[in-house]
Image (spheres, helix red, strand yellow):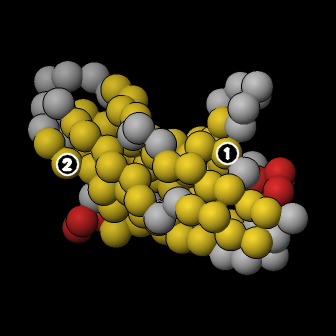
Amino acid sequence: QVRLVESGGGLVQAGGSLRLSCVASGSIFSINAMGWYRQAPGNQREFVAVIASGSIKNYADSVEGRFTISRDNAKNTVYLQMNSLQPEDAAVYYCYARGRTSPSIGLADFWGQGTQVTVSS
């Protein structure tokens, strides 16, 4: 199995910054993409950012220009640098990875347990 562990969440004032990290471990044959979703209370889980092979990046409109996603392939780690945080960014942030556990098995999505980001106004 593949395990994803997030870190870096916490409490920050509006306008501040946080950096989230997510490390993937376990039976990893290959990872095609890693990224972040978030879920605020009462809301559905929403896409935040993704980085695919070849360093192709995509962001939700709501975070474009404020958040930066990066990846260390050698460490199976993805980062999310969050700047100019606003109260509406407060949520549980979930890391995900899309990859294979063996060459004969198709792509699957794996999820972390989430890390809380709280933004005070």
Q: Residue at x 76, y 28 (%)?
A: 43
Q: Mark 1 or mark 2, which has the lower sequence index?
A: 2
Q: Is residue 47 visible?
A: no
Q: Residue at x 20, y 22 (%)?
A: 105
**In screen coordinates, is 25 left or right of 83?**
left
Camera-nearest label, 1 or 2: 1
Q: Position of residue 58 (x, y in %)?
A: 65, 54
86, above or below 27, in the image: below
* Proximity of marks 1 and 2: CB atoms separated by less than 8 Å: no
- Quadrant that contains the C terminus: bottom right
What amino acid type should be assigned to the residue bearing mark 2? Ser
Q: Is residue 18 visible?
A: yes
Q: Quadrant of residue 103?
A: top left
**In screen coordinates, is 80 left or right of 89?**
left
Circle 1 residue: 91
Compare residues 88 and 11 and report the one nearer the observer: 11
65, above or below 91, in the image: below
Circle 2 residue: 25
Q: Residue at x 27, y 50 (%)?
A: 24
Compare residues 60 and 104 and report the one nearer the observer: 60
Q: Residue at x 40, y 53 (%)?
A: 6
Mark 1 Cα within 10 Å, few/some/many (few <14, many 20+)? many
Q: Position of residue 72 (x, y in %)?
A: 34, 69
What amino acid type should be assigned to the residue bearing mark 1? Ala
Q: Position of residue 115 (x, y in %)?
A: 50, 49
Compare residues 36 and 100 and report the one nearer the observer: 36
Label 1 residue SS: strand
Q: CA distance from mark 1 to mark 2?
A: 24 Å
Q: Quadrant of residue 119?
A: bottom right
Q: Position of residue 82 (x, y in %)?
A: 65, 68
**In screen coordinates, is 107 left or right of 36?**
left
